[in-house]
Structure formats: C-alpha cells, structure tokens
Image: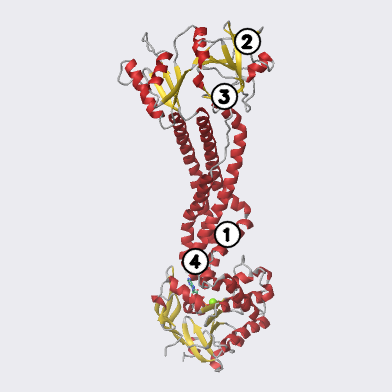
C-alpha cells in the first residue's frame, strides 16, 4: 500500500543572479491518509516551498513527488487543476479571498470549477459556511468581515470541495491566539473526520497539537517524528554542532 | 457553467469603474455608432430610390436622342410607330419637351414656372400617378385627343392655382409666351415641400404638340417609354436601340446619338454608387473599431496584471487554464458588447437627428412627390454591428486572456 504523499529527494533551487538558494535541499517525506502533520522551522527554511509542491502549485527542480500513487510531474495543467479541485483544500495565511465576490460566491468557487450546477452549489456552499458559523454573512463582502471571520470563510471554501487533504500555510499567523485556537479546532475536527491535514506554523504551542512534527532548516528535514517528543519543539541554535540530526 | 458568473463579474467591474469603462469602450461606441449612421442613411436613400421607382413604374424607359451637326432626327411620330410595331414589349411613349418661357395670368407674370410638353402616356389613370410622380387632384389630365388636335389646354401645379387663380383655376385661362391655354386639371400639392415660386408645385403640363408649336420647333430630345412590364424593359430597350441604330445608320450609336436607360438601370446605378460610397465610409468607421479593439486589449492586459493574485487563487481552487481564459474572454466580450449596444443607440439617435436635418433637402432633390426619407438601420445592420463588436472583444480579449490562463499558479498567488 503506497503513501498518500511521497516526496523523494526533492530539491527546489532558485537562481538569484550569481547566488543559488536551495529552498528545498534533498527532502524525503511521506505522509499517510488521516495524518495530522505540522511543518515547523524558522523563516526561510522552506516550509511554504514544500507545501506548494505538495499542493501541486509549484514543481520541484529535481526529485519526484507522488500524490495518491501518481507522479505529479506526468500530469498536465488540466489534470493538476483537477487534483487541486477534488483532492486538495488550501488555507492561506492571508486568507486569499477574492474581494469583489461575496462570501458565498467565494465559497462556491471550488464547486464552480468542479462543474456543480447553480442551486446545488449554493446549497453546499451554505452548508460549508454553516460549519464555520458564518451562514448569516453569506451576502457580505470579505472586507466587511474581521480577520478571524475571513479565515473561517477560507476554511469553509477549502471544505466546500470536500477535499481529502487540507493544506494550511500559517492559518493562524495573522490571528490573535484565541481566534488561532479556534481555527486549529476546526482543523483537528476535520482530521478526526478522516481528512489528512498538513499545517505550517512557527508557533510551538500550535505545533504540539499535531500528531507529528516535521522540522525544516535550510531546506533540509532535521526532525520528523512524534509531536510530543521534546526534541520536536526545540528551536535549534544557529550553531550547527547543537543541531539534532533528522530521524 | 461559469458564464453567468463571468458575465456578472464583468458587469460589476464595468460598473465600479464607469469612467474607465466608458473610455475603454469609446472606440467601439464611435465605430459602431458611425457604422449605424452610415447604414441608416444608406438605407434611407435606398428606400427613397425604391419609392421613386415604385411611383414612376419599374417599366419606364428614358431615351435621350440628339442629332450631331445637321443630321436628321426621329420625329415623335416615328417613336409612336416603333411602339405600335412592338406591342409585345412596348406599351406607350410620351415626348418630354421642356418649354422655356413666361406664364401670364392677367397682369401677373411667372417666369420661374417649369413647363413640360407631354402626351397622354405620361399619366396612368389606374394609379393616378404621372411618370414623374405627380397626381391629379382636380379636373383631368391631358388626353390623346388633346395631343392629336394640339388643343390649347394645360394642367397646372398647386402653387400656380393658388397664386394665379386664388384656388379656382378649372376652365380659366393663362398664357405661355403669348399663347392662351385653358386649365383642364390641377395637380396635387407636394405636401412635404414648401409651396413657392420655382418649386415643384409651380409647373404646367401641356400637350407636347402644343408645346412644340409654342417654342417653334419640331425637335424632341427626350422620350419616356413604357414597357409591358419591368421584366420586358431590357428587351424594349434593345428594340429602341436597334431602331435608332438603323435610323442613324450605325452599328452602335449609343452615347453618340442616343442614350437609353431603364428605370431598373437607373435605380441600380444609384444604388451601386451608394453602396460604393457606403463601403468606403464603413471601412473608415472600421478603423475606429480596430482602435476600439486595441483599447479593449490594453485594458484587459491591465486587468490581468491587476488581478494576477485573483487568478492565482482561482487556480489554487482548481480553475483550469480554459476556465481562466473564458472568464477574461467573456469579460472582454461583455465590455465590447455593451460598447456595441451604446454605439447602436448612439448611432440610431444620430441617424434620427440627421433624418430631420437632411430629410427635407433630400426629398426635395428627388423631385417627386410623396417620397419620404427614413434613416433607420435595418435589423440586419443592427445585428451585424452587435455581432462585430462582440467579435472584436473576443478577438482582442483572447491574447490577454491567454496570458492569464498560462500564469504559473504559485507565481500568480505570490504576486502583489
Ligand atoms: N520565488 C522565489 N524566488 C527566489 N527565492 C525564493 C522564492 N521563493 C522562496 N525563495 C527562497 O526560498 C527559501 C524558502 O522560502 P519559503 O517561502 O519556503 O520559506 P518559509 O519557510 O515558508 O518561510 P516563512 O516562515 O517566512 O514563510 C527562502 O530563502 C526564500 O528566499
Ligand atoms: Mg512561508
């Protein structure tokens, strides 16, 4: 039985003039159906890069990525779009709602691209909004909502397409700690219902709520294991000697 | 599927920046407006020609004959003989003699009155129209016997009746170049024209025989023939041409001795000239449409750049390149379609204004009563302009739309 997500020797290298940046530097990572994984690491360590590759938004410079057993590099644009639409749900730090569309229209988008017709689309989008407790804001514009509410809308949007993998890149980054915990609660709930959740955070108190922590540094995985292992939450020094080797 | 949303979004973004929308659409509005005005005027003019043809009869043939040097010319009686010899194609002929001179009634003098010597064939009692589009309102028209006996009778226009006879002319007399004539009929007033000296209502018809006597000539330069029908007009023309060629002892004397045109030929010639003129004007207007298209392309490129992030979001939610492409193409098409509709409205309005401004003058220049000028575009013209404007939007919107469709999802999402 193959893994749901499988990265093998993944490199992402940016050429900035004469300088080369190894955003990902030989990453091997597997995630199985139903896991709740937190990816942590300092700023610039390659967390978002890894997540974008997992989300089929970006392609590795080298190495292979299999999603559900299929090599993503063999898929064309339409197939990748289809995967993003049917399998993946994104939650971004900046919410990424479309400002001109109402809350309801934003939540309807994944269903629109899935070809779900009008009334059914509305019904499902409203259900999804109900789950995050924002049904009564359906006709509002995103700008009329608080940050926490906007993030809940983006969760509702990610849920609308009933994805099996939720990818959340610092979803609590722009929120106060109480609202942040609320958002985390939703993710835990979804995970209990069977979804695979991959969460990026630099907040240890949030990371420990996951089952498993993957710590990145300079594009390399330096820890991958149980979230309750004390080593998982240790912020390593700049001094390379003190670094904990990857498991 | 997402057509309605794209369409609604396009409307929304047009409404939120009205100034920008109007400026974007300006080229299309002007271009489509100009096309509509041109086609409306063309349609109005064609309509006038058609009305003229209908009035005078599609079976009318005009023959101009002239005699170079001291050559003999055919007499009216020769022309009657030709008609009599070809009853299969020709039904009648009227000489058309232009009389120059002065009309007098008592002490009053009218020297701008048009006077024509004609025969009874000039008038069709069944339709109550003369070949040049006049109608008899009182009395009767000139008859065969009037012509045959050179009767001193005449039919006068409404202006003369009013001015010279205070509205009661029948049976009274006037004189042309000293020759006294009795009024036997009065023509109907040309309602759309002003009644004034020298106007179309200031005219006199008299038997051509009487007219030739008054001007002291035997020589008729213009004949109006009628053929049995519109279809036989061409055959009738050949009969006349052959006869004239034999008369002038030539193989082909057209342009040298005579010139014959059928009503259909005249209408075709005028319509042909008009469609050439309209074609040129529409081509000029098309340049504005091209500029309009480039304007739309420009604004769409700006829009794609402004909304790069939105494109990234849509892609992250599973929009395929073709979904993004159709969104922007629909937006461009909507913009130009609205521009087209505004242009059509603006064009129709302008055409109506031109109709009232130019109508009187045009109708007068046709010189036939009862002709009207309606500068309204045909449904086809409206449909075509609308189609062309939508087409331009789609054509010029395609490039920016394709640019948006090809954006890399992560680059688009990161853009700010
Ligand atoms: N498009 C790009 N062009 C050049 N360099 C890039 C690009 N995207 C990322 N990088 C570089 O790759 C490295 C990893 O970036 P990434 O966004 O994955 O970091 P991160 O771990 O998500 O950081 P943060 O916690 O600040 O979000 C950084 O050094 C960054 O400068
Ligand atoms: Mg990041």
| Residue A92 in the image, given as x and y percentages of width and height | 57, 76
Confirm whether circles 4 and 2 share one chain.
yes
Instruction: Work out which quarter of the rendered image holds the N terminus of chain A and state it.
Output: bottom left
Q: CA distance from mark 1 to mark 2?
A: 77 Å
Image mark 1: chain: B
Image mark 2: chain: B
Mark 2 Cα shell of 10 Å, populated few (<14), some (14-19), many (≥20): some
What residue is drawn where x is 53% and y is 34%?
A: B45
Answer whether residue A174 is visible to the viewer in this image.
no
Mark 4 Cα shell of 10 Å, populated few (<14), some (14-19), many (≥20): many
Question: CB under 8 Å between callouts 1 and 3?
Answer: no
* Secondary structure type for disc 1: helix
Q: Which mark is residue B134?
A: 3
Total marks shown come to: 4
| Residue A184 in the image, given as x and y percentages of width and height | 61, 84
Q: Earlier in the sequence, mark 1 or mark 2?
A: 1
| Residue B59 in the image, given as x and y percentages of width and height | 45, 28
Confirm whether circles 4 and 1 share one chain.
yes
Q: Earlier in the sequence, mark 1 or mark 3?
A: 1
């Amino acid at each position: 039985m193959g893994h749901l997500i499988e990265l093998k020797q993944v490199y992402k290298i940016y050429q900035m003039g004469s300088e080369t940046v190894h955003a990902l530097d030989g990453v091997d990572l597997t995630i199985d159906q139903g896991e709740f994984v937190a990816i942590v690491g300092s700023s610039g360590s390659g967390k978002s890069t890894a997540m974008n590759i997992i989300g089929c938004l970006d392609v590795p410079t080298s190495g292979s990525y299999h999603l559900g057993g299929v090599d993503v590099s063999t898929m064309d644009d339409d197939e990748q779009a289809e995967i993003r639409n049917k399998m993946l749900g994104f939650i971004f730090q900046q919410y990424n709602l479309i400002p001109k569309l109402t809350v309801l229209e934003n939540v309807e988008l994944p269903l629109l691209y899935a070809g779900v017709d009008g009334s059914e689309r509305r019904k499902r989008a409203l259900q999804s909004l109900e789950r995050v407790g924002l049904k009564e804001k359906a006709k509002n514009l995103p700008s009329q909502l608080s940050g926490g509410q906007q993030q809940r809308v983006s969760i509702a949007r990610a849920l609308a397409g009933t994805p099996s993998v939720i990818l959340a890149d610092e979803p609590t980054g722009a929120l106060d700690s109480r609202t942040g915990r609320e958002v985390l609660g939703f993710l835990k709930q979804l995970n209990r219902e069977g979804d695979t959740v991959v969460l990026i955070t630099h907040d240890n108190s949030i990371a420990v709520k996951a089952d498993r922590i993957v710590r990145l540094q300079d594009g390399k995985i330096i820890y991958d294991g149980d979230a309750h292992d004390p080593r998982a939450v240790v912020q390593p020094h700049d001094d390379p000697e003190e670094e904990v080797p990857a498991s | 599927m997402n057509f309605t949303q794209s369409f609604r979004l396009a409307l929304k973004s047009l409404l939120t920046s009205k100034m920008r929308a109007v400026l974007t659409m300006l080229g299309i509005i002007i271009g489509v407006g100009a096309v509509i005005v041109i086609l409306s005027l063309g349609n109005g003019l064609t309509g006038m020609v058609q009305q003229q043809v209908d009035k005078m009869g599609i079976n009318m043939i005009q023959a101009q004959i002239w005699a170079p040097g001291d050559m003999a010319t055919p007499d009216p009686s020769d022309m009657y003989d030709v008609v009599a010899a070809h009853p299969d194609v020709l039904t009648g002929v009227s000489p058309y003699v232009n009389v120059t001179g002065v009309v007098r009634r008592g002490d009053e003098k009218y020297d701008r009155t048009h006077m024509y010597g004609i025969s009874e064939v000039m008038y069709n009692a069944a339709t109550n129209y003369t070949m040049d589009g006049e109608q008899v309102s009182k009395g009767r028209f000139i008859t065969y016997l009037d012509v045959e006996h050179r009767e001193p009778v005449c039919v006068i226009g409404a202006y003369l009746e009013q001015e010279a006879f205070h509205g009661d002319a029948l049976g009274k007399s006037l004189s042309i170049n000293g020759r006294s004539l009795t009024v036997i009929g009065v023509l109907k007033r040309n309602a759309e024209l002003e009644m004034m000296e020298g106007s179309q209502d200031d005219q006199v018809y008299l038997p051509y025989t009487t007219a030739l006597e008054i001007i002291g000539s035997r020589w008729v330069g213009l004949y109006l023939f009628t053929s049995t029908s519109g279809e036989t007009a061409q055959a009738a023309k050949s009969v006349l041409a052959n006869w004239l060629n034999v008369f002038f002892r030539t193989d082909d004397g057209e342009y040298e001795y005579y010139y014959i045109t059928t009503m259909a030929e005249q209408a075709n010639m005028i319509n042909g000239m008009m469609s050439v003129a309209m074609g040129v004007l529409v081509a000029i207007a098309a340049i504005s449409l091209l500029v309009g298209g480039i304007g739309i392309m420009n604004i769409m490129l700006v829009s794609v750049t402004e909304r790069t992030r939105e494109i990234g979001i849509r892609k992250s939610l599973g929009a395929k390149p073709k979904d993004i492409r159709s969104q922007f193409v629909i937006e461009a098409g909507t913009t130009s379609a609205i521009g087209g509709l505004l242009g059509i409205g603006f064009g129709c309005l302008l055409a109506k204004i031109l109709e009232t401004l130019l109508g009187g003058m045009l109708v007068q220049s046709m010189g036939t009563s009862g002709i009207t000028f309606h500068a309204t575009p045909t449904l086809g013209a409206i449909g075509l302009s609308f189609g062309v404007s939508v087409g331009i939007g789609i054509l010029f919107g395609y490039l920016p739309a394709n640019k948006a469709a090809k954006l890399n999802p992560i680059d688009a999402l990161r853009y700010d």
